[in-house]
Amino acid sequence: MGRSQETFFKKQREKNRERKKREKLEKKENRRAASTGGSEIDWDSAPENKTMTKEEMDQKAQNRQETKD
């Protein structure tokens, strides 16, 4: 009789594990569906980087111009 009880508890643990796994996947899918793609960054109000050299600033400006086109 003890053997069947162990088997029963084992089956219950397996069912609970599967249910928990399914719920976790559902939550993950819901979060992914409701995601807005992260937080918006307001680059205009961000502090200016004063450590860049003139060449780096020129390269950055050139990259910005290329990405806008």
Image (tube, rainbow, N blue to C red):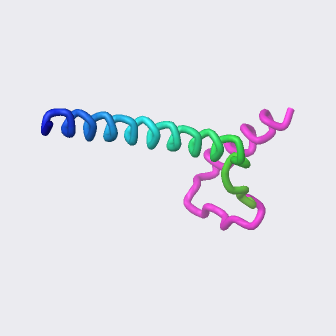
Residue farthest to the right, as pictured: 69
Q: Residue 25: where, in percent of width, then height? A: 53, 38
Q: Quadrant of residue 65?
A: top right
The residue under the point 71% across, 58% down is 41
Q: Nearest the camera: 7 or 55?
A: 7
Q: Is residue 46 one of those drawn in magenta? A: yes
Left or right: 13 in relation to 66: left
Q: Secondary structure of the magenta portion, mostly?
A: helix
Q: Nearest the camera: 3 or 63?
A: 3
Q: Residue 61: where, in percent of width, then height? A: 74, 45
Left or right: 41 in relation to 18: right
Q: Is residue 50 above or below residue 2?
A: below
Q: Is residue 25 above or below residue 51?
A: above
The residue under the point 50% across, 43% down is 24
The residue under the point 74% across, 39% down is 62
Q: Nearest the camera: 28 or 41?
A: 28
Left or right: 24 in relation to 47: left
The segment highlighted magenta reads 43-69
